[in-house]
Amino acid sequence: MRRAVVVVLDGMRRDLISDESTPALARFAARAQSFAAHRSMFPSATRVVSASFATGCTPARHELQGNSLALMENGRLVYHDAGHPEFLQHKRRVTGRSLAVPTMAERLGPHGGMILFSNVSPGAAYAHDPDGHGHVYHRAGSFGPGRKRIEGAGALKIAQDAAGERAMTVRFVEEVLFDRRPALALLWMGEPDASQHVMPLGSPQHLAVLRQADANFARVVEAVDRLRDKGDDVLLIACSDHGHQTVSRVVDIEAELIAAGLKDSRESGDVVTPTSGTSTLVYIHPDHAAKTDDIGAFLSSRDWVDRVVPAAELASVGQAPHQSLAFAISLKSDDEPNAFGVRGHSYESRPAPGKTTHEGCGQHGGLARYEQMPFLMIDGAGFAAGGVSIAPTSPIDIAPTILAHLEVPAEGMDGRGLRT
Ligand SMILES: [Zn+2]
């Protein structure tokens, strides 16, 4: 039986894989093909990457533009947190579609199905299957085909901690890999991302988190070996969705635009600036389009930006001017080491009220070097054990790679299959 098994270690930086901190991943590199130029999406954020992973398409095509974003509703630009469990259901009501292109869950519905176990934000988990074709298990609610809610012991009741990650992995191995045997089995762990947001990268407590996540990965590898011994043709993919930078400063972009006279107030709908950590999207209401050039000049003149991408150039970063998106900003970064020798700092956009900032700890979302340094390793037919590919790859290439292994058509995707 042809099957695909994917393990995602959310936020795992490629350059932090080592014999000491992640021995199972380091060993896996000897039997898998590694992709040394693998990048994230933009924004380099979990909800965006989840939608790209699921659809094989850039945000310009799937329309999940950021971890937070704006939708034009009844003539108003409305801010949304895409991590909210109901976000894509709401987007379907507003725009007529959740994601604008089909997911792997939909494509695999008649071909063995998809089962996801996820411990990240609800919105990121549900981006894999917003229309209810497969099975999605998440602590905020688990759903089967038709988005029928799974109740009782069948639901996934775990915490966002080491014990929860371990329990999720053990259940994934026993129930999903051995008993239910879907065509695509996907385990998306919340670590090391969750801990990296609240502890310094490279600190002893951070390295302990890496070892725990690596041990969960080792459980899946051991299970896949047993499946292969029983005759299954398994494509095993290990990857992350983005890396992390150390936050060196927090910038209140909204306040700066108000102070410069380019936005009326915090509450005004003329200019809306939802953040994705170290990046920000700037939406300008069509009634205020006359401000666009002044806002572009102001943003480009700030010492807190690396890059301001105007509407006409959004395609170069996989975005499009949907919903009156006018600019995308990647905040200032450097290549300096932190106190533990881990390189790369970035400025962080001040998040929405009630959300915390991350000075001295990890964050991501932009185009900087280390947040754009996720890892990808693929073990299975058509991939060279111990080989290293230097061709550019990104999360949009994973779905066509999986579907090629499963012999299911992957037409209409932006990415390309990676099997040689
Ligand atoms: Zn992530």
Image (cartoon, rainbow, N blue to C red):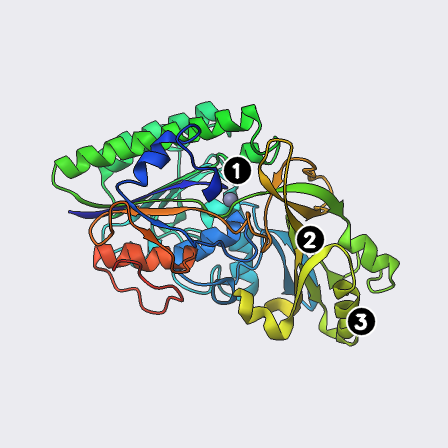
Give residue 284's quadrant in the image: bottom right
Determine whether, in the image, residue 354 is placed left or right of residue 312. Answer: right
Asked if ligand 1 lies within 8 A of label 1, the reply is yes
Query: For the residue labelled by badge 1, is the local secondary structure a helix, a strand or a loop?
Result: helix
Is any part of residue 288 visible from this angle?
no
Labels 1 & 3 near each other (Cβ < 8 A): no
Q: From the image, tell me which residue sits under label 1.
A: 193
Q: Is residue 303 above or below residue 224?
A: below
Residue 213, given in percent of the width and then of the height, sits at 43, 31
Residue 329, given in percent of the width and then of the height, sits at 66, 60
Labels 2 & 1 near each other (Cβ < 8 A): no
Give the mark toward the camera: 2 or 1. Answer: 2
Please tell me which residue lies in front, 285 or 5: 5
Q: Counting other residues with Cα less than 10 Å from the Cα at mark 1, is it few (<14), some (14-19), or many (20 or more)?
A: many
Q: Is residue 230 above or below residue 203?
A: below
Q: Counting other residues with Cα less than 10 Å from the Cα at mark 2, is it few (<14), some (14-19), or many (20 or more)?
A: many
Quarter of the image with the C terminus in it: bottom left
At x 69% / y 64%, what residue is drawn? 283
Q: What whole-number distance in Å separates the C-alpha atoms at marks 1 and 3?
A: 37 Å
- Residue type indicated by callout 2: Lys
Residue 5, given in percent of the width and then of the height, sits at 29, 43
Give the mark toward the camera: 3 or 2. Answer: 2
Q: From the image, tell me which residue sits under label 2.
A: 332
Q: What label does residue 294 carry, if any?
A: 3
Query: For the residue labelled by badge 2, is the local secondary structure a helix, a strand or a loop?
Result: loop
- Residue type indicated by callout 3: Asp
